[in-house]
Amino acid sequence: MGERLVTDAERRARLGRRHALAPRHRVATPEDATRTMTVLHATEAPTVYLSVAARSDATVGAVDRALYDDRSLVRQLAMRRTLFVFPRDLLPAVWGSAAARVADIERRKIARNVEDDGRTEDGLVWLDARATEIESLLHERGTLSARQIREALPELDGKVATSTTSPWGGPTPVAPRVLTMLGASALLVRGRNAGHWRVNRPTWTVMDDWLGAVPEALPAREGYAELVRRWLRTFGPGTETDLVWWLGSTKTAVRHALADVGAVEVDLEDGSPGWLLPDDLDAEPALDPWAALLPTLDPTTMGWKQRDFYLDPDHTPYLFDSNGNAGTTVWWEGRIVGCWVQDPDGVVVPVLREDVGADGDAAIATEADRLTRWLDGQVVSSVYASAQMKQARLP
């Protein structure tokens, strides 16, 4: 038996308050919004801005300032080979743990691929040479796009097959893969975006040029422990399955981290064991009813592997793609009840999958109006549009 029972209703109350989604609990700055969530998803550029907007009144300019001027928030490839925005102080933890794991996997894959392609007999030596060339180029010329780097360094031009046996392992450009691996390893970092905030056009620079003094990465075990500590503060209670999935790690690493932070077992409503930090065992007070509109891949929507306490499984094929990527979501009282889209004029339109009553309709309409004003006529597109967003008919 766990220390106590944490009901689904309490988990939803924790979510509304701790994720700064309930209007009375919003925060002030992009940095506050990011720390509240541990990290923000950044696979799609607009997600960062819209996730901040859902939790604060911060403007696009304020997010740009945090990312590109103050550099208090930093893009980093890490867990599950996914791009996130991290608060700067969390970088040493992830560099030594989840990011290092991704970098090692990618490094070995690329080395094997360039050997199979006949470019070299030793892929690891080839990669080290390319890393040295890229670092020297960026120190000399400053921030550059992937295309500019490729044009300056001919060895990075062309494509290599990702597999000699799989039908999906056809030739892919080698330069983006090398840059991605070096970003995961924290040698490089994505600098300023070459386009507007709604598109991904990253430039690349050397991490120590971008941050100045670069702290040492933590040892892997310490790094995982810090990531788990912050995840539990944001998302707890969660299960071992949730953490293994979110970290993209192993059960062994998660169990060591739970032990290292002194996590306490609790009982969840579905009968499975969950985990909380030892100083976070008090019952969460109830919240007034609240609504929220979140973007594709928002960290709340993507925070757990086991989602039944906030997502009706029947809604999943309409609101998530086949790979588990979430489209936009509409929330009412801590549960996902639909998605949102925009009309040609940029007006936000909620599309609900269940009846939320008059109070829910009114609260959701208020949040839709708020987001419409924030977007100010700008229409956001996504490659992760869900079936509901596309108005697809499913059986």
Image (cartoon, rainbow, N blue to C red):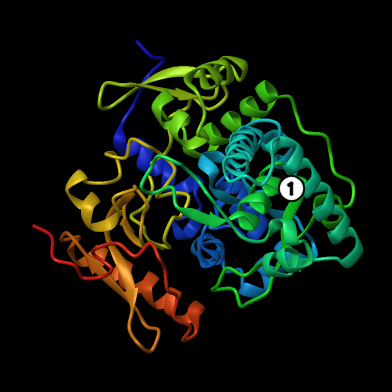
Look at the picture and state if 260 lies above or below 161. Answer: above
**Which image quadrant: the C terminus?**
bottom left
Q: Residue 246 placed where, x, y %?
A: 48, 37
Q: Residue furthest left?
A: 395
Looking at the image, can residue 66 be seen? no
Residue 268, quarter of the rendered image = top left
Q: Residue at x 37, y 37 (%)?
A: 305
Examine the rendered structure and indicate whether residue 95 appears above or below residue 263: below
Question: What residue type is disc 1 on?
Answer: Arg
Q: Position of residue 359 (x, y in %)?
A: 24, 64
Name the quadrant containing residue 347.
bottom left
- Quadrant occupied by the N terminus: top left
Q: Looking at the picture, how far across and down is residue 163, in whole percent?
A: 47, 42
Q: Nearer the viewer, residue 172 or 47?
A: 172
Residue at the extreme bottom: 345
Q: Residue at x 69, y 42 (%)?
A: 120
Q: Position of residue 311 (x, y in %)?
A: 27, 46
Q: What is the crowding at mark 1: few (fewer than 14 residues within 10 Å), some, or many (at least 20)?
A: some
Location of residue 201 with respect to 31 vertically, above or below: below
Task: Look at mark 1 in the image and give the residue it sits on.
Answer: 88
